Image: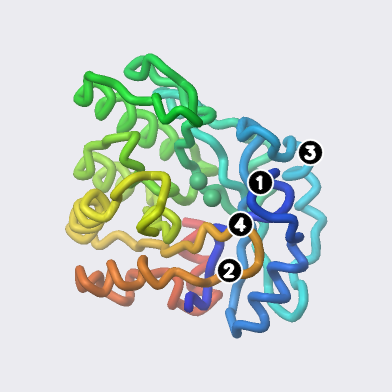
């Protein structure tokens, strides 16, 4: 179990759950977690909430059901220029921002189709795609409001793992190890080998990393056994795994 889990979704994301922030907080407290972060999808995800939801989180209670709560977002990276679907003005009012690529909202010159459901968002020019995807992540990292890159292991979006880690070191960005990616039935394909390569590159820079449940709803909050297994297998230094830090230290790293 992760004492700290900040990549979680509520009913506001528009799919996968009807649970509220309070439901997640109750469950997190029951599991003995020390900190919960909520990160609903940005407006470019079909059915998700609008910017006004994220704006209103500023006045949400800092503690719920006996556990401290951070309010963030999982913003969509929209293109190879690293544009996000939440404005900087709104991001400035949040505790953190995870930036991720999702098939429903990412448009790149390397992809000639855009339908998520028929899984056709593929390209024959893998090296061009790798260039544009890596560029998208790096440009998103240049945004001072972005703290975390979410699931960069998606097999639909090949990347240059070395360049990703180098940029993360330069911009003080945290790379995520995402439980939903590693699930055997996961819709991001077989991500294990890519995640291993990313983590090996991160280790060279002694980068702090974040394990996430990416839970849609309360049940799986704090659960990331596959992510924990992978970092253990690679002997990733425990002191660099943010989930096991004290809440105070975690927040300090997040705010760097
Ligand atoms: Zn995501
Ligand atoms: Zn997510």
Q: Residue at x 42, y 64 (%)?
A: 211
What number is the disc on residue 221?
2
**Dot 2: few (<14), some (14–19), or many (≥20) neighbours within 10 Å?**
many
Q: Nearer the viewer, residue 131 or 233?
A: 233
Q: Residue at x 47, y 32 (%)?
A: 103
Mark 4 CB lies closer than 8 A to ligand 2: yes
What number is the disc on residue 224?
none
**Dot 3: few (<14), some (14–19), or many (≥20) neighbours within 10 Å?**
few
What number is the disc on residue 216?
4
Do the numbered discs 1 and 4 sit on residues whose CB atoms are within 8 Å? Answer: yes
Q: Secondary structure at mark 1?
A: loop
Q: Nearer the viewer, residue 76 or 122?
A: 122
Mark 1 CB lies closer than 8 A to ligand 2: no
In the rendered image, the vertical position of residue 140 relative to residue 177, given as above or below: above
The residue that label 1 is drawn on is 15
Counting residues from the N terminus, which is met first, the one under dot 1 or under dot 4?
1
Q: Is residue 151 left or right of residue 15?
A: left
| Distance between the alpha carbons at the discs numbered 4 and 3 | 21 Å
Mark 3 CB lies closer than 8 A to ligand 2: no
Q: Secondary structure at mark 4?
A: strand
């Amino acid at each position: 179990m992760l004492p700290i889990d900040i990549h979680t979704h509520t009913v506001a994301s528009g799919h996968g759950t009807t649970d509220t922030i309070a439901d997640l907080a109750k469950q997190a407290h029951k599991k003995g977690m020390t900190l919960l972060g909520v990160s609903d999808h940005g407006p470019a995800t079909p059915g998700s909430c609008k910017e006004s939801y994220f704006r209103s989180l500023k006045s949400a209670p800092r503690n719920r059901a006996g556990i401290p709560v951070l309010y963030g977002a999982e913003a969509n990276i929209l293109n190879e220029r690293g544009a996000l679907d939440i404005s900087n003005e709104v991001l400035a009012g949040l505790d953190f921002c995870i930036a991720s690529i999702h098939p429903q909202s990412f448009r790149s010159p390397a992809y000639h189709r855009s339908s998520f459901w028929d899984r056709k968002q593929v390209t024959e020019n893998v090296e061009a795609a790798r260039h544009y995807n890596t560029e998208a992540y790096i440009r998103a990292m240049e945004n001072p409001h972005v703290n975390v890159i979410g699931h960069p292991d998606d097999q639909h979006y090949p990347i240059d793992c070395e360049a990703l880690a180098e940029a993360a070191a330069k911009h003080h960005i945290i790379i995520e190890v995402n439980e939903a990616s590693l699930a055997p039935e996961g819709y991001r394909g077989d991500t294990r080998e890519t995640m291993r390569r990313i983590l090996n590159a991160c280790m060279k820079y002694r980068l702090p990393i974040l394990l996430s449940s990416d839970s849609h709803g309360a049940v799986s909050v704090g659960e990331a056994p596959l992510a924990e297994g992978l970092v253990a297998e690679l002997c990733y230094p425990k002191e660099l795994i943010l989930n096991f830090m004290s809440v105070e230290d975690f927040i300090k790293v997040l705010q760097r």
